[in-house]
């Protein structure tokens, strides 16, 4: 979640830049420590944009959707829904 007090320049890539180096990403992560009471299990740096990650793992019919993993393992009770726009009540959150 983005801190509401942060300016877009503190969270976004520079104009015209579509990626950053591994070192730049690690520096950015270290500059924003994990809040007290939270634990980081593992740090994985993917060569994907947020949209690319969504398309591969979270989107409806994503090729590497977690449910497909469960299907391959032989699970029988797998339920999922499609992404929907939030209701007015959900937008308040």
Image: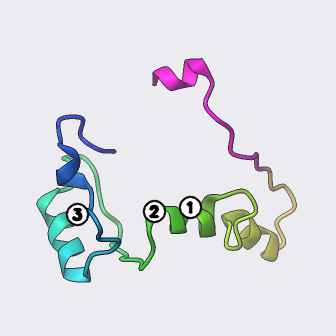
The CA span between labels 3 and 2 is 16 Å
Expressed as whole percent of the image width and height from the top left, the position of residue 81 reads: 76, 46
Q: Is residue 91 magenta?
A: yes
User: From what the image shows, is residue 13 above or below residue 87?
Assistant: below
Bounds of the magenta segment? 80-93
Secondary structure beneath label 1: helix
Give whichever of discs 1 and 3 has the lower sequence position: 3
What is the quadrant of the N terminus in the image? top left
* Quarter location, residue 90: top right
Q: Nearer the viewer, residue 12 or 87?
A: 12
Give whichever of discs 3 and 2 has the lower sequence position: 3
Which residue position is annotated with label 1? 54
User: From what the image shows, is residue 42 above or below residue 77?
Assistant: below
* Whether label 2 touches label 1, CB < 8 Å: yes
Secondary structure beneath label 2: helix
Which residue position is annotated with label 2? 50
Q: Nearer the viewer, residue 74 or 67?
A: 67
The CA span between labels 1 and 3 is 22 Å
Expressed as whole percent of the image width and height from the top left, the position of residue 43 reads: 33, 72
Which residue occupies 27% across, 76% down?
A: 20
| Left or right: where 11 falls relative to 54 | left
Q: Which numbered tag is attached to residue 68?
A: none
Secondary structure beneath label 3: loop
Q: Residues within 10 Å of mark 3 (few under 14, many from 20)?
A: few
The CA span between labels 2 and 1 is 6 Å
Which residue occupies 16% across, 57% down?
A: 33
Which residue position is annotated with label 3? 14
Expressed as whole percent of the image width and height from the top left, the position of residue 64 reads: 67, 73
* Quarter location, residue 77: bottom right
| Left or right: where 87 falls relative to 9 | right
């Amino acid at each position: 979640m983005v801190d509401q007090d942060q300016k877009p320049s503190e969270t976004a890539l520079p104009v015209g830049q579509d990626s950053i180096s591994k070192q730049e990403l690690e520096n950015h992560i270290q500059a924003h420590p994990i809040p007290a009471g939270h634990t980081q299990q593992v740090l994985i740096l993917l060569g994907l944009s947020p949209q690319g990650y969504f398309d591969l793992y979270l989107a409806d019919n994503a090729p590497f959707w977690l449910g497909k993993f469960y299907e391959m393992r032989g699970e029988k009770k797998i339920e999922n829904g499609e992404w929907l726009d939030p209701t007015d009540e959900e937008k308040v959150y």
